[in-house]
Amino acid sequence: MSRLVEYLLRRLGFYALAAWVAITLNFLIPRLMPGDPAQIMFARFKGEMNPVAIAALRETFGLTDAPMWMQYLSYLEHLFRGDMGISVSYFPEPVVNVIATGLSWSIFLAGTALIISFLLGTALGALAAWRRGGLLDSVAPPLLSLLGAFPYFWMAMLALFLFGFGLGWFPLWHAYPEGTSPGLNLPFLAGALYHAALPAATIVIASLGGWMLAMRNTMVGVLGSDYITYARARGLSPRRVLIRYAARNALLPNITGFGMAFGFVLGGALLTEIIFSYPGQGYLLIQAVRAQDYPLMQGLFLTITLAVLGANWLVDIVTLMLDPRTRR
Amino acid sequence: MRRAVHAGSTVALFLLLCLPGCRRNEPEFRPGVLTVAQEQQSSWVRNFHPFLPMGVARWPTSAGIYEPLMIFNRINGEYVPWLATGYSWSGGADRVTFTIRDGVRWSDGTPFSAEDVVFTFDLLKKKPALDTGGIWKFLESVQLDGQGRVVMRFQRPYSPGLMTLAHLPIVPARVWREIEDPVTFSNPNPVATGPFTEVRHFGNQVWEIGRNPHYWQKGQPKVEALRFPAFPTNEQVTLALIHGEVDWAGSFIPAIDRIFVGRDPEHHGYWFPLVAGSIYLYPSQRVPAFRDVRVRKALSLAIDREMVIRVALYNYTKPAEPAGLSDGYAKWRHPGFGPGDGWVHYDPKAAEKLLDEAGLKRQGEGGMRSGPDGNPLELEISVIAGWSDWVRACQVMARTLRAVGIDAKVKAYDFTGWFQKVQRGEFDLTMGWTDDGPTPYHVFRGIMATETVLPFGEASYANWHRFGNDEADKLLHRFERTVDGNEQREIAWRLQEIFLAEAPAIPIFLNPSWGQYNTKRFVGWPTAGNPYARLSPNHPPETLLVMTGLKPAPATEAVRDNQ
């Protein structure tokens, strides 16, 4: 048991180090980009600004010419207080509030789609490997790979046009119906599910093939191992062999992949959000990069990084439960 | 089995939940509510700060919620009195007096007065971060003058400053005096004089603003509320327009007659007046070959503008005039210049002749030309990635330039990177806009005034190509000192003569003001047949003229009367 605690603590130490590196890179990368946020902001006025006004605005934005290490220290200090600064492109709104307009929706849409895709893909993969050469195994992988190979942008546009605009089955935009107020009430919750259905479906379709193939291939390898043959020889029920013996082991690579995918999903649901006019982080990220909005960029990267680290930590724990070898 | 039942009930529950919403997604409308798509955002942030730029504060904060003293109407080139009933110059161009309108009230019912105007200007002086128009660069003082008049004294005679003063949104002194930090105040509940002031609902996807109960124009606005759904890009706005959900928008739509108007020719319409300004190709003085006026003229003669407009702009516009002035400056155009004069037309033979004369020799028969120093001349046309019409226009121009032996390649940059390069003058050729104003003063100042020439590497808001002309400087200074229309016109003609002789920048086409409307629920839109303002919502404060010109379509009114 003490070994387990030690292992967990070691992992925690590793995550702390990773978080520090991420936080530091997060500070450095925006500052290595060409351009100056103050200039971009002034460009929007499309006029000749008073130098006094420029200096005053720079000060308000917290843009200083202080040495990098001083900026870094004050950045760390603010971060620990949960203050990510004021957004330049959504001035004078604090970054925390700007991110709050979309974060929960991003997590809801991308998270739901990811979990459905993961569960469905893994289950299909396991079944396909179990009945190798069967109908599922010969039809689903090529079909899903084909769907996954379509440019996502194109597929989502097509879905929106066909099912939203043409047939009118699904809403064309937004995350919940107008006139409902966010909260625990049936019209809002039902509406939110209804609005999420089409965008989530496109993500699931695009990513299902990957999960399924990965699971199927590992499963095929696992099914060929001696202990499966032994389990069958002992006369265990096929279902038990499939789930407790084969799938449990074959699942490990996919679980690791899940932690990684969560990060991609948070930053990468960008296209989904834009095509379906869904509030979320993706569009904010583009906006922040365009406007050289350092504080907002940092806030978003940090949220994504911490989410990925958190997800990986959970994955570590799940792996620990599934695979006794890691506990040694 | 139990699991199957469980799954079945989940599906049933989902169907049950979504069935009421599963009928066809026809847009729902409440009478009197007009839907606008002007800003592109994925979620709204509540901000009604009148002095922040467009895109930061919600449209129509600066003109719609708040109001200016006067509105310059770009269509007829005249000032429309608004919170001021008129203005007059005195002492040459170093003092302007605005007469403030009587009987205007703030949306909370308290009276508006000249003191609010003085307070607003003083606020910008005290908080330079808010003075984004640079008003206090030429302003000396703003004072009350007895009977509802406000006198603004200038540091030096500066007649072109009028528009900046007239367009400043006026805020209530009583409210803004109490605000601790007016720079970082997001002003969630605006008190203003405009037609729309009552925020009825503010969500991250849709927000709505209702009419001002105390609006000073009797019976206005006839629109009950403005509604703003969030759309992140042009494509979603286009879809919403076609779907009939949006009544008023200002976006670029390709092949608009087929895509938008064709869907409902009875109600869908657009108007793209060519009054905004012209789009130029700027040759940077950093390239030695471009310091020769013959080369600059040859570049212009080599460009097939008709083809640019047909291929890249769906024929939405027309080629630039000889001196580059758009239709918005029609009355300022030199009467002596007609189509085909000068060098703003397509004549590749003349272009080749000029290039030969300038010593840009072709390297072998049909080869590309070398620079005056004999080295190969390889040029880059910088353009903004994603501005697809501009990228295509640059590609067409590069092709026609190569036909006369100029080796030009198009390179697209992200907006930020492009803008930084361009402002610093670090480019060969780039497409860009000009400074804009009620007179051609700002246009020519930004194209050829010595005082706008900054060193390469320093960011400049105008004159990216770094061209200065002493004669133009003198004329521009004379222009600043006079308020006499005839004298200004004569100066503008002289400036155009210099432009024609020097070819500092290459005008390509007139920049359209994008505007789309739907007459299903509201009528009274500005059109070519009823040109009382620009249709496009992208040009405040002219938007105020449209907001007070609209009324519900007869059918909707009938429906409301019947209820």
Image (cartoon, helix red, strand yellow):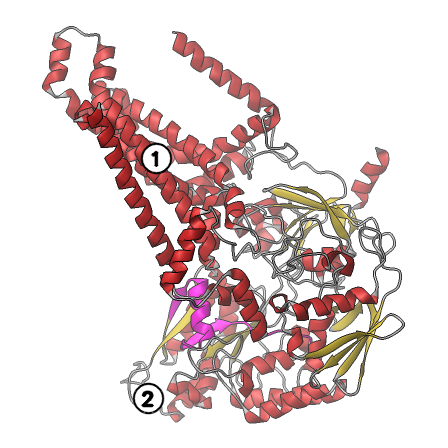
Q: Are marks 1 and 2 in contact (CB under 8 Å)?
A: no
User: Residue B562 occupies which quadrant of the picture?
Assistant: top right
Which residue, given by chain and number where applicable, does mark 1 sit on?
A: A311
Question: Callout 2: 10 Å neighbours few (<14), some, many (20+)?
Answer: some
Within the magenta stretch, is there residue B416?
A: yes
Left or right: A308 with respect to B132?
left
Q: Residue furthest left?
A: A226
Which part of the image, by quadrant, shows the C terminus of chain B?
top right
Q: x, y percentage for residue B104?
A: 85, 59
Left or right: A142 with respect to A192?
left
Q: x, y percentage for residue A322?
A: 24, 23
Q: x, y percentage for residue A102?
A: 51, 42
**SS for callout 2:** loop
Left or right: B38 with respect to B303?
right
Question: Above or below — where is A6 with respect to B333?
Answer: above
Magenta residues, start to end: B410-438
Q: Is residue A283 visible?
A: yes
**SS for callout 1:** helix
Which residue, given by chain and number where applicable, does mark 2 sit on?
A: B361
